[in-house]
Structure formats: C-alpha cells, structure tokens
Image: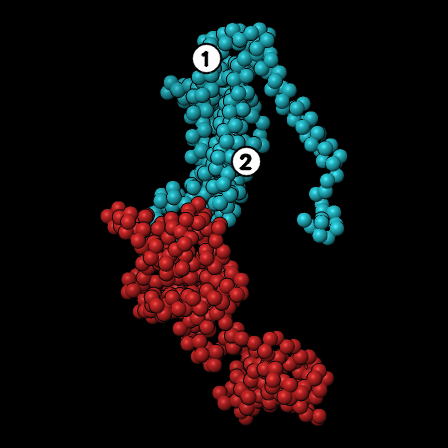
Chain colours: A red, B cyan
Amino acid sequence: MAIQVSGITKQFGHYRALDQVDLEVRSGELLALLGPSGSGKTTLLRIMAGLESADSGSLQLHGEEALGLSPRERQVGFVFQHYALFRHMTVFENVAFGLKVRPRAQRFGRSEIKRRVMELLELVQLAHFADRYPAQLSGGQRQRVALARALAIEPKVLLLDEPFGALDAKVRKELRRWLRKLHDDIHITSVFVTHDQEEALELADRVVVMSQGRIEQVGSPADVYDHPASAFVYEFLGQVNRFDCTVADGVARVANGALAIPTENGVQGEAIAYVRPHDLGLSPSAGGPGRVSGIHVVGPDARVEVDLAGLTLEAEMDRERLSFLGLRPGDRCAVHIDRARVFPRR
Amino acid sequence: MLAKTSGQRPALDDRSWVRGFLILSALGFLLLFLVLPLVAVFVEALHRGVDAYWDALVEPDALSAIQLTLIVAAIAVPLNLVFGVAASWCISKFDFRGKGLLITLIDLPFSVSPVISGIIYVLLFGLHGVLGPFLKSQGVQIIFAVPGLVLATIFVTFPFVARELIPLMQEQGTEEEEAALVLGASGWQTFWRVTLPNIKWGLLYGVLLCNARAMGEFGAVSVVSGHIRGETNTMPLHVEILYNEYNFVAAFSVASVLAMLALVTLVAKTVLEWRFGAELAATRH
C-alpha cells in the first residue's frame, strides 16, 4: 500500500473540507480524485503532500506515519495546476532545483545533476528547451517541465493538482494521453485531482468520487460509471435524466405513470430514477406519449429533447440512428427505457 | 495596420495638436516644478564661485552633517530593508487574524505628519517623557542625540520597502514557495533561491526610495535633533540653519549635495532598469 489515509478530517473555520476520509492508494496505480469544487479533493491531495495540515486522522506513506513530517521530508512529487515554475530560472535550473537543494552529504556532483536533468528533459521531450525561461514556453510545455521537476527528486508518489486544468481542450487531451503513456512506462504511484469526469474515466486505474468532504465511491472507471453507488455519483458522472418517481411492486412510475420503469434493487416508495441519455430509446409513433421538442446535432451525435407529460427528457444517439428514425421537431414518439437506476429519495 | 485594412481610425490617432499640447504641458510642468528649482539650487550654490562652494562643504559643521546623514541612513535603511521583507513575507504568504490592522499600521508613518512622529519620540524618550527618567538614570540619551535621529528616521521611512513588496508578493502568490518546499528546500533555501530573486527589483526600488527619504527627512528629525551644530545636525537641518542665518551660498551648497544624491538615486534606478530590463521581462509571467 503506497498511501493509507485513515479518518482524516479538516475544518476551515465553520466549513468542513474533509470528514473522516479513509482511502488506500495501491503501489504503482494512477488514481483520480474526482469531484465538484468544494468536495475536498484538493485539500486531501495537499494534506498528502504536507502543504496542508489535517485536524485529525492518520496518513501513511509506504507504511510510515507522515502527518508529522514536513513537505521536504515526505519525498513526494507535486504538480500544480498553474505549474508554479520558478520564473527566474531556466527550464534546466527548474528541474535541477530539487537536486541542488539537497543537504551536501546527499547531493550529487555537478555532472551527475546535469546528466539526470537532461535525462528527465529527454523524457518529457523538452531537451531542446533547457535554456529557455518558463515565460517562453506554452502551457503544455510548462506543465511537462513541472512534471520533470517533480520527478527529479525520485519521489515515492506523484501528486498532481488539476494538472490539465489551465490548458486548452486540445492540448489537454494530448497531454492526458501522454501522461497515461508515461505512467505505463515508469509506474510511479500517482494521485491526480480533477473535476472533469471524462479525464478521470479515461486516465485513471481507479477513480475516487468525492462530494462535500466525503468519499462517495471508489472503483475502476467502468465500475463507477456502470454501477454508481449513490445518486450523487450517478448525477456527477456524465449526462443524466432525473425523474421523481414512486416505486411500487418493482415498478417506478414517473409523472403519474406516463413512464414506467422496472426496478430490481428493492427500493420502495418515493424515489429518484436516473436514466443516461443513451439509455433512453425513442421510436416514432403517431399516438405516442412524447413529443420531440428539439434536436441538437453535435459532431457525430444527436441530442433529442422530448416533452413527456410535462417533463423534459434528453435522449442521445448517433446521427445515422436519428435519420433512420426520421424524427423531426414536433413529431410524436414513444419512449423506452433500456436501463435506469432508482435511488430512494433522501 | 488596423486603420489601413478597416479604414477606421484607431484610438491613438495622429491628431498632432492634441499630442503636441499634452507633451508640451507635461514638459512645461516638469520644467517649472522640477528642473527650474533644481537648476536654481546649483546656480545659487555656485554664484560666488567654486571655491566658496567647496569651502561651504568642507567646513567642519557641514562635514559632520554629511557624516551624520550617512550614518543615520546606513543604520535606518538596512533595518527597514529587513523589516520590510519580513513584514511583506508574512503579510503576503500567510493568513492570520489582524492582517488588515498590520497593513494599516505599516502605513501609519505615511499618514501622520513627520512632526508628530518626532514629538511622539520626545514624549516617550525625552527628559520629561514616559521613559525619560529611567533612561537618564541608566545614562542613555536618545532625544537630542544620534539614537533619536535614527529612531525617527526609521519610523518615517518604515513603509517604503514593505509598500513596494506587498502588492508584488501578493500577486506572485505562494505556489513557487510551496513547490520549493515539496522539492526538499528548507525555509532559508526557499527564501534565498525562490522568494528573494522574485522580488529583487521591487526590493531594490523600495530601498532606493527608502534611502532617498532617510537622507532627506526633515520634520521628524528636526523635532528630536535639538539642532546642535556639529553633533546632531543632519544635512537638511544644516541647510535650514545656514539659510536662516542668511548664509545662502553655504545653504545651497549643502542642498546641492542632497540634490545630487537624489539624481544619483534616479540614475541608478534607470541604469538598473535598462541593464536588466530584458531579464525583468523574461521573468514575468
């Protein structure tokens, strides 16, 4: 176990940022802390790094209690959202920093530092930029320098705080793939914070979904997406249709029975049903209960809005399917639900 | 370029008379209020010839005033440098209760009249002041002596460095320091290798301003000095005494040294900006 978090609590004034959080990070895995802003994910990461203190609980890094240790003693790599590169140093000096500030007895010689720094710059594909200043680099390049700098101290774990948050969409996607590949090559235990569910699902080995200072669910990306443990996780991961319903005899009835959804998880009474837009099927039907109120085409996909007994539903399908169905705004249609999850109302 | 392609007039147009008027009025203002007085100082100082000028400067009381001014600045400026860096470090990198109050207190010397600052020290340390009898029994004299001059100067020049650094350091944030700590740097290493290089230009500028004021301070120093010739007179005070004695050549001679100090400060600042301008630009995000 690389990192063991037990019962960590953190309070800022009256605001409880973390509430009795328990978490295990396995050696060599790439773990995502996913949640909306204010869910405590960044606070948890900063506590792991020692940049924030915990009010109570314990944190073990490779079996050693770490809460009492200062950041410099923890030997973790930390990558900041806004890079935090030393602006008055060149790329080379930035990466060399962690090696140069070591106590004399543990410090490498000048040539060894140079060899290691160049090796890391090679790894992040920035060897040609060694003499540049951070201000002369693009966002994606800066973040790669920040990564090389964090790796220079040979950290036991790598912590990344919204590492792609400040980048534009295209660079973000490239850097994401690149980071995944890098992790597959060097297998360093890594934890990254993100509020972007797509990023977490694509990149991570396991995803930790957080909300209001608590962990809602931990699991593989497929796991949390297909089997959300709570209403919050269902809503947070991807688009969703949300209906108030009443469950009786294994059937959830929405809007006085305009829509009937079979359930099997034993929920009874007042409940909330969730349906992903791509699990909502439509078919043209002259006497159908639904009416198409809008169609939005985004690239290869189409989103179809349907009015049904005062509710607005959203269905998602590819464009070919849409043209096969021949639906147009104003058409009547039937609605089938292929898959739904029902949670008791809190 | 825009103007040519779109046919529209850009905001900064070649309305030459507007530009000309603005430039002329700015130059006229500078000439009237800055250059003319400066020239007047040197003209007055030199109008009896270079010998009279030189005599006024090497006369023992003048030399003592120059020496005292340098001593006071040499003590006050380094102390305010250390204080200013410490205060801005703590204000900009940490969150604590009473931060607003601390910032207000740092500004206090700017907002009270220097004469009042001087009187405060007299009330505290003077013979009839709160601590006066105790200090006298210990044989320590502060008012009408060099310690009083140093204290008053420190008080008046207190905000210069901190005021220059606080906005700069607040804008820079704490992430670079955090990065340094995580990379294994100690507090000192972080300060010397990360914080100080990031603020060095602002710091230098603050120190130059602080020094200019420390050497030129009149009000507060005047109250605590006692005007003892050759002992507790700094250059500005010496100028005043000479002027009141209708010794204009000497007064303006000493004043011209102060003026040259100001010019040197300005030139030093300009040279630094010119010499390191490229590096400055490169290190800004």
Q: Is residue A91 above or below residue A288?
A: above
Q: Secondary structure at mark 2?
A: helix
Query: Can the viewer see residue A171 in this picture?
Result: yes
Q: Give the camera-side residue of A281 and A144.
A: A144
**Residue at 53% across, 42% down:** B167
Task: For mark 1, name the chain.
Answer: B
Q: Which residue is mark 1?
A: B63
Give how far across and how far down residue A343 sits, in percent.
Answer: 52, 82
Give how far across and how far down residue A144 sits, in percent.
Answer: 43, 59
Residue A118 shown left or right of residue B266 in the figure: left
Q: Spatial distance from mark 2 to mark 1, Cα to Cα?
A: 34 Å
Q: Which residue is mark 2?
A: B107
Query: Can the viewer see residue B229 in this picture?
Result: no
Does the residue at mark 2 contact the one at mark 1 (Cβ under 8 Å)? no
Badge nearest the viewer, 2 or 1: 1
Extreme residue toward the front, this view: B4
Residue A261 shown left or right of residue B72 in the figure: right
Q: Is residue B76 above or below residue B228?
A: below
Residue type, mark 2 in image? Asp
Q: Quadrant of the C terminus of chain A?
A: bottom right
Give how far across and how far down residue A265 sits, in percent.
Answer: 49, 87
**Residue at 42% across, 35% down:** B82
Give how far across and how far down residue B8 sits, in percent.
Answer: 75, 50
Residue A73: mark in rendering: none
Q: Give the camera-side residue of B270 and B9.
A: B9
Residue type, mark 1 in image? Leu
